């Protein structure tokens, strides 16, 4: 935190800090096994994530006060100090100092997480019932979803709480035009007539690192990807749908507004994509090794 390696219990700030004005990133480091079965960690999509943090800072007029290389060094030191042997979630956070808003606090918390991916992972196939939220996604002419600000998640919370009240697991937003936007913390992809379809950046989505990578690697599987607006009814008519994001990885969706998607759950295309993504994250796909930064 602010250039020092400290225990979480000592990472304290005044309750008067403007934390709601902050920006952040959600990044993951995955274990790659060597021939002896020993693991080393690689950060996935570091460059894209750190560039987005800088973009968010520019949009929100925040000054980060460190270089991108200094933040990578902080990530490496924090992971080493924790002695993590398993997958690690990394969440750099930046917010303006209350007594000097021209400067920011910068903290890089890290913690272990359980992946949804991997062969025979029972969590992957769990049933997930979604609803279309009655709350619209924040629009880019009001609170731009392209900047990863904490404030944006107040919109997500409204949708999550509504979904829970209505007995669903989670929600999908429409944008202010009424087209499908994204989930509360991940982007959305649908499968229809053998094609993967995902809404464009102009549909009030976060410019997701995972979505960009999915758009690039999915055609390797012989599945074309179309980036275009999706209507609510098209979503209902999808054979498959899944969320993609750092947190959600590749999360299959069982139904939307109680309309079951397709015949098989999780769908065959979703399974293929998740398995390939899992291999990419584990460093098994040579073509995409440059998406991985060794810790
Ligand atoms: N949309 C929202 C609202 C999110 O919070 C996230 C998670 N960061 C995503 C999409 C996915 O983005 P990424 O793939 O960069 O994690």
Image (cartoon, rainbow, N blue to C red):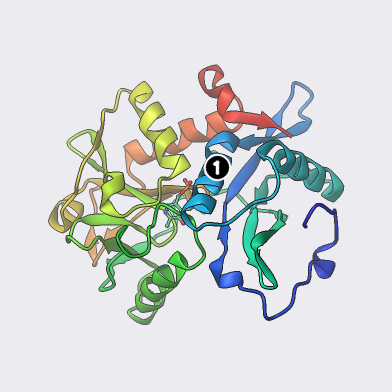
Spot occupied by residue 155 in the image (x, y as percentages of width and height): 39, 70
Q: Tell me what residue is drawn at x 55 percent, y 42 percent.
A: 49
Q: Tell me what residue is drawn at x 70 percent, y 80 percent.
A: 15
Q: Quadrant of residue 147?
A: bottom left
Secondary structure type for disc 1: helix
Above or below residue 81? Residue 126 is below
Q: For residue 121, say whether it is visible.
A: no
Instruction: Name the quadrant of the C terminus.
Output: top right
Spot occupied by residue 261 in the image (x, y as percentages of width and height): 24, 53
Query: Residue 259 vs residue 5: left or right?
Result: left
Spot occupied by residue 19 in the image (x, y as percentages of width and height): 61, 70
Beta carbon at label 1 within 8 Å of ligand 1 = yes
Question: Crowding at label 1, few (<14), some or many (≥20) Cα neighbours within 10 Å?
Answer: some
Q: Quickly name the residue at label 1.
A: 49
Q: Tell me what residue is drawn at x 40 percent, y 62 percent.
A: 184
Query: Residue 166 vs residue 279: left or right?
Result: left
Instruction: Name the quadrant of the N terminus.
Output: bottom right
Which residue occupies the foreground of this view, 259 or 15? Answer: 15
Q: Quadrant of residue 136?
A: bottom left
Spot occupied by residue 238 in the image (x, y as percentages of width and height): 20, 48
Q: For residue 192, say whether it is visible.
A: yes
Above or below residue 59? Residue 284 is above
Q: Tell me what residue is drawn at x 47 percent, y 30 percent.
A: 276
Which residue occupies the foreground of this view, 191 or 157? Answer: 157
């Amino acid at each position: 935190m602010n250039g020092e390696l400290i225990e979480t219990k000592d990472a304290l700030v005044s309750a008067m800090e403007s934390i709601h004005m902050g920006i952040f990133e959600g990044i993951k480091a995955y274990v790659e096994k060597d021939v002896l079965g020993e693991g080393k960690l690689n950060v996935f999509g570091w460059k894209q994530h750190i560039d987005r943090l800088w973009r968010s800072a520019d949009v929100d007029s925040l000054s980060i006060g460190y270089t991108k290389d200094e933040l990578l060094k902080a990530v490496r030191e924090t992971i080493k100090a924790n002695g993590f042997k398993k997958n690690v979630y990394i969440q750099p956070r930046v917010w303006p100092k209350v007594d000097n808003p021209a400067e920011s606090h910068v903290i890089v918390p890290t913690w272990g997480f359980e992946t949804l991916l991997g062969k025979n992972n029972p969590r992957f196939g769990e049933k997930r019932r979604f609803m279309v939220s009655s709350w619209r996604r924040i629009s880019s002419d009001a609170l731009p979803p392209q900047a990863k600000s904490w404030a944006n998640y107040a919109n997500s919370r409204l949708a999550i709480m509504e979904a829970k009240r209505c007995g669903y697991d989670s929600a999908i937003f429409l944008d202010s035009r009424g087209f499908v936007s994204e989930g509360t913390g991940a982007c959305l992809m649908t499968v229809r007539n053998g094609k993967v379809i995902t809404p464009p950046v102009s549909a009030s989505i976060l410019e997701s690192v995972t979505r960009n990578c999915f758009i690039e690697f999915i055609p390797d599987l012989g599945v074309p990807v179309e980036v275009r607006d999706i209507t609510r009814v098209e979503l209902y008519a999808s054979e498959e749908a899944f969320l993609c994001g750092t947190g959600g990885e590749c999360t299959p969706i069982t139904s939307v507004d109680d309309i079951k998607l397709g015949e098989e759950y999780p769908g065959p295309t979703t399974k293929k994509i998740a398995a390939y993504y899992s291999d990419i994250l584990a460093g098994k796909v040579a073509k995409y090794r440059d998406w991985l930064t060794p810790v």
